[in-house]
Image (cartoon, grey):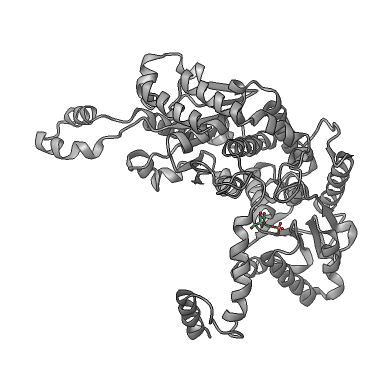
């Protein structure tokens, strides 16, 4: 791999691949060459620093890293999460073809279908009012209590699919900060509220603590006996849920082969199903399934997740770009960058390879972003003129959900396309001077100010265009990024499916709790931590 990466670095220099502007000027077919369509979806990577030789080098990397073989092993249910001894089969959750998927020789599809059917019955009951609260009133507000993968997916998806939201109001409580649940409870009438406790392990301290607070809220307002009518749970730890006091017909299971950050397709998607209905949820699954088939069968140069992953690896390990910006031109995708942060950074933020040796080069980049056009008026300055190059990933629909506001959508599209064009083209010093001169500005002023108006250009971006943000398209978009993370993880040769990096902080927090409670001394902690404890306790009322 190292030799191939070095070779690719030489190819970049020898072929001047990073002069994207020149590549466009010399090849009118560049867009056609470096873009791929997948039904109504278009993936344009022509504004990245690629040429045929670079793509050959990336293809060689994919072969050397056995990306296709690793992909097939994932779909086949092999134990690819080696540190936890688990298969990785979120793809089975959206396997609309219903072909058998074997784990330890057992087909998981009957269980997958049974939970999906139970979710459908329950969500229909809540949406129609057939399932009522303890006092006989219809449920108007559903609160999902979960964190990380048990929160980000449903909260992000509910926002994204707001046009389909015709069920009860949804709320999401994740943070251990009491402000989160306190502010939510203030909005609720206990008689018409349902709480979903969502936790794969059913041990996460934030979720368990918030669930206990919510339970106390119901018990105090409606009595202990009402609790069962106002709670349900989603977990793989069915025994622990039962111990919490939730009836078995209100427990929706999933399995250890579903990673938390890949669990939106499982019963973790229950709040989304309650919001948009089981038919729309089915469309969402179908979109992801379509991408699974595409990822498995499309040749590499027409395979969007393969290309996305290879470009991501190229940006990080060949060109050395440390971050990437996710810039959806869709206000309803406002939490999509945060969702991808967990998906990508928890998956590929690793320092050792599958055999426990240090990763050569870099693993996953920092992922961040905000919707356009808001970001344009905040941080795009740095993307255009800052000293770091940040690959930008744009996404835009041809049609909004507000036909009466078509002009606003046209402005949105124009802004999205203008940004990627500006990043690629930039503006030379001569162009800046000429533009200023055309405005009749003074020569000295032009000399002084023109350098500030220079844009280096040649800044890479890729763009997704699709018809409309429907549940199907949304399912496709998430699945494309999931598989992109897989491809990059395969190239880094890491385990993308564990998350040991979050454990140390959890352990230390457990040890510090009695210290901040004032029950134990801070002795043994470093002087900074002890000093901070002392300051907090001194000010505590
Ligand atoms: O913070 C780590 C993590 O394990 C995530 O991977 C997971 O999505 C989140 O915590 C929540 O875990 P659980 O669903 O078990 O409560």
x then y, percent, for residue 115: 85, 47
Q: Residue at x 52, y 35 (%)?
A: 313
Q: Is residue 64 above or below residue 94?
A: above
Q: Residue at x 82, y 30 (%)?
A: 97
The vertical placement of 374 against 514, above or below, is: above
Q: Is residue 511 left or right of residue 329?
A: right
Percent across and percent down for residue 471 are 69, 37
Left or right: residue 345 compared with residue 282: left
Residue 273 visible: yes
Residue sitting at x 40%, y 26%: 10
- Residue drawn at x 66%, y 50% is 498
Can you tell me which quadrant of the image ligand 1 is in?
bottom right
Q: Nearer the viewer, residue 536 or 164?
A: 536
For the N terminus, the image quarter is top right
Residue 249 appears at what percent x and percent y? 90, 57
The residue lying toward the viewer, choosing from 193 and 498, is: 498
**Can residue 135 be seen at all in this image of the molecule?**
no
**Total count of labels:** 0
Q: Can you give x and y, in whole percent of width and height, for residue 231 in the image?
A: 80, 63
Left/right placement of residue 162 relative to residue 220 reads: left
Front position in the image: 62 or 140: 62
Q: Nearer the viewer, residue 216 or 241?
A: 241
């Amino acid at each position: 791999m190292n030799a191939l990466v070095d070779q690719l670095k030489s190819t970049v220099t020898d072929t001047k691949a990073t002069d994207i502007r020149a590549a466009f000027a010399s090849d009118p077919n560049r867009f056609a060459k470096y873009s791929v369509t997948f039904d109504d979806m278009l993936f344009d990577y022509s504004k990245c620093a690629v040429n045929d030789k670079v793509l050959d080098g990336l293809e060689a990397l994919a072969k050397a890293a056995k990306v296709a073989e690793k992909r097939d092993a994932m779909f086949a249910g092999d134990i690819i999460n080696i540190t936890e001894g688990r298969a990785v089969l979120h793809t089975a959750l959206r396997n609309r073809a219903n072909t058998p998927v074997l784990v330890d020789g057992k087909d998981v599809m009957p269980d997958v279908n049974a939970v999906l059917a139970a979710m459908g019955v329950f969500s229909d009951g809540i949406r129609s009012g057939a399932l009522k609260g303890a006092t006989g009133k219809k449920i108007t507000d559903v609160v999902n209590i979960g964190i990380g993968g048990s929160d980000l997916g449903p909260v992000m998806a509910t926002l994204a699919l707001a046009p389909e939201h015709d069920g009860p109001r949804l709320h999401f409580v994740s943070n251990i900060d009491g402000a989160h649940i306190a502010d939510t409870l203030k909005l609720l009438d206990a008689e018409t509220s349902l709480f979903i406790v969502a936790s794969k392990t059913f041990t996460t301290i934030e979720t368990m603590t918030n669930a206990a607070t919510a339970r106390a809220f119901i018990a105090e307002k409606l009595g202990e006996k009402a609790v069962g009518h106002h709670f349900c749970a989603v977990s793989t730890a069915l025994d622990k849920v039962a111990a919490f006091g939730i009836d078995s017909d209100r427990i929706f299971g999933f399995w250890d082969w579903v990673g938390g950050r890949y669990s939106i397709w499982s019963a973790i998607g229950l709040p989304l199903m309650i919001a948009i209905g089981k038919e729309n949820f089915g469309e969402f699954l179908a979109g992801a399934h379509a991408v699974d088939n595409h990822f498995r069968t499309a040749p590499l140069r027409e395979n969007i997740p393969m290309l996305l992953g290879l470009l991501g690896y190229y940006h990080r390990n060949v060109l050395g770009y440390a971050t990437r910006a996710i810039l959806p031109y869709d206000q309803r995708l406002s939490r999509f960058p945060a969702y991808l942060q967990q998906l990508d950074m928890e998956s590929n933020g690793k320092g050792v390879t599958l055999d426990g040796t240090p990763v050569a080069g870099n693993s996953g980049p920092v992922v961040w972003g905000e919707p356009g056009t808001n970001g344009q008026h905040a941080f795009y300055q740095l993307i255009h003129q800052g000293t770091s190059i940040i690959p930008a990933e744009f996404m835009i629909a041809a049609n909004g959900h507000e036909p009466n506001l078509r002009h606003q959508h046209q402005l949105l599209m124009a802004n999205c396309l203008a940004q990627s064009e500006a990043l690629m083209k930039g503006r030379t010093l001569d162009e800046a001077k000429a533009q200023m001169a055309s405005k009749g500005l003074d020569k000295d002023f032009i000399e002084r100010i023109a350098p500030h108006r220079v844009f280096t250009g040649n800044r890479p971006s890729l763009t997704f265009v699709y018809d409309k943000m429907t549940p199907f398209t949304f399912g496709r978009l998430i699945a494309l990024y999931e598989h992109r993370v897989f491809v990059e993880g395969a190239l880094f040769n890491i385990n993308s499916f564990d998350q040991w990096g979050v454990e140390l902080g959890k352990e230390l927090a457990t040890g510090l709790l009695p210290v901040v409670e004032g029950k134990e001394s801070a002795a043994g902690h470093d002087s900074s931590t002890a000093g901070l404890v002392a300051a907090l306790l001194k000010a505590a009322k």
